[in-house]
Image: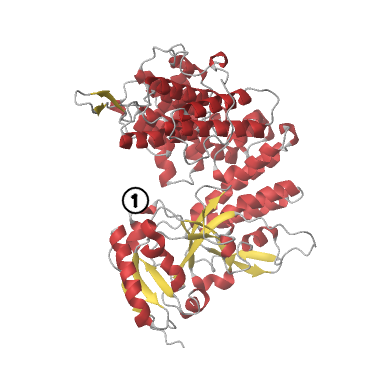
Amino acid sequence: MNYEILTLNLTFPDWKRWYGRNVFVAEEEVPAPARTVGEDYASGESFGLYVDDDELAYQHALCMADQIRRKNQTKARYWLYFNRFYKDIINYLHVSEMMSAGTRETAEFLLRYAATYNLKEKLADIVHSYWEDYCESGALYALDFDGLYMACGDKMLFEKRDITAAVRFYELAALDWETDEEESGRSRKRKREVPGLADLRAIAGEKMLSSKKEDVREEEYGCRELYAAFIVLRAENPGAYDRLLDYAGRFCAAYGQFIGVREGRQNQNAGQTIQSAVRRCYSMALVMKRMGLPYALFYLAEEGRGVQADYRDAVWRGLYETTRENLFPIQKYVRSVKNEQEIPYEMLLDLAYCAGVTELISLILLEEDTEQELAYYTSIETFRFLLPEHAGEECGKLSVMHMAYMNDPNEGKTLQRFVSRKDAEDGERARRSVRYPYVFMKCFTSLIDDLPMWEMYGNHAKGCCVILDKDCLEDNEQRGKIPLYRVCYLKKSRGGYRATKEANPQIKDWRSLSAYLKLLRQFYDRLRGNPAALQIYFQILDAITFLFKDADYQHEQELRILYSYGEASDEFRHTPGEFPKLYLLPDFYIWMKELILGPKVENIAEKMPYLQEQIEKMCDEIGVLMPEITVSEIQYR
């Protein structure tokens, strides 16, 4: 196997030669504050109405810069002062919309200082917000500091290795700032272009490049073709770990040749074509290393001790820096240990192998082409949260709730009992962990208008059954956004659970699934003597543990939309209330084929006009046909 992706060198300090000395701020350039300004200088409603309010913001920023430069302070204090500095930038721009040449120069200094000493994506957000306000208010001067924004983007890319944040800064340089007044007194727009920006946006999203090879004048030594082949294969056959690893290794060789040729040419006079090619190939290398790491670890775990030893440092560093969700539990452990020598290397490889196995299991259970009609049962009250009156502009998007709110007390325990060969909870008396994984799911079934389903999930037959239109799942634009999985049912047996084909006739690649489940059992046995390793092992399993249920429920023929997060995310939403519930609102719409009211729904004549009106408005909003609305055929009172 080719493990070059583990040792791929992504250090690239030469980017700094592209810029002169005036982009970032030297220590001696920072003036001392002329006066002390209190923290509450901008707290009053009148802030921004007085002539010297911009000076207050500037002087407070200098006070914060003075605090930031002091040595032997805690990390918490350092971040506090810098957060206040960023707030000062916002305040300064707020009161200086009608900028003079002097205030424009001061604004540039504040941006340069933040970029030099603590660059965050928030700085791009601040400038972009000013640009939106600027276009509306018609301020006289623009923050068109193209060189600074490109340098910020390159710092994010080559030092912080964050393509998405880098793109945010490159986009600032591409904004159409209004400059150069016409005779009429109105300013006119100057068109900007950042070479290769569309490609970088595509790479940040792990997608195909938008430009064609003939559009690229700088030789890239096959990087583009190998990256494209990798992306296509990963989309069409994500379980082909061996071929994906091979493409990653061949890419490393091409990238090494590309960078080698560029050595000595990275200076301030390097043309935009060269700079654009370097950014593009470097970004592709970042993505390849991020995506290729799990494949390399998967096969390295099967190698002999001699081969494994050659990559010890690279494995530790890769796990420490990884951004792959399925490796986050291992990453947290690696970062918590101060001395890497304290970490059992073989244990890390075993856990990485388990992460690969869990991903392969999820790929087998992923339902890409379902021929069955799918539906979900819910109460009418919950269904209303899908409609315009409650959801507003986001109507038609399905709320996916956190797994903690499921009504089955055994939810998420079946797979754990399978791998540990236990048919009940441990009998030991100890403080029980109440940690919940960040798993969100919505349950569906192919059983339409089914009495047991009405009783269990349809508010005791007083709710409704929402039947999905198949076009919703087959639409190319939406399909890739819907992580729909088939549930695997495990049968109780003496000493735990067992996996059988009879309980899962609709799972196509049963042989592979059965083999992977046996591997999970074997690794449980290997790791059970190490409590820390076992805890990480079960955290890795969190990504798939809610795709397994007791075979007592196999009649439900269940499928689930499931999202798993390794850590808290800004995508989480909260319901109102003293203790809000967590949920997601995925970026796809539910197209209804039919809405069936339960057999025990009362006062249908009172409820239907409102439901019909709201559903019709929702369908108009998202551009789909109005569904049929019917009543269950079941006689149940």
In the rendered structure, the answer to whether residue 592 lies left or right of residue 112 reads left
Residue occupying image coordinates x 38% and y 75%: 596
Quarter of the image for residue 408 reads: bottom right
- Residue in front for this viewpoint, 307 or 585: 585
Give the residue type at disc 1: Glu
All told, the count of numbered labels is: 1
* Vertical relation: 397 (above or below) 97: below
Residue at which label 1 appears: 477
In the rendered structure, the answer to whether residue 221 lies left or right of residue 66 reads left
- Residue in front for this viewpoint, 147 or 222: 147
Q: Secondary structure at mark 1?
A: helix
Residue occupying image coordinates x 35% and y 59%: 472
* Vertical relation: 438 (above or below) 10: below
Q: Residue furthest right?
A: 429
* Vertical relation: 535 (above or below) 408: above
Residue occupying image coordinates x 34% and y 51%: 477
Q: Position of residue 272 (x, y in %)?
A: 35, 19
Asked whether the viewer can see residue 617, the reply is yes
Q: Position of residue 531 (x, y in %)?
A: 75, 49
Asked whether the viewer can see residue 287, the reply is no
Q: Position of residue 131 (x, y in %)?
A: 36, 33
Q: Position of residue 409 (x, y in %)?
A: 63, 68
Quadrant into which the N terminus falls: top right
Residue occupying image coordinates x 36% and y 80%: 606
Answer few, some or many: residues within 10 Å of disc 1's Cα (few below 14, many 20 plus, some between 14 and 19): few
In the rendered structure, the answer to whether residue 42 lies left or right of residue 534 reads left
In the rendered structure, the answer to whether residue 229 lies left or right of residue 85 reads left
- Residue in front for this viewpoint, 238 or 556: 556
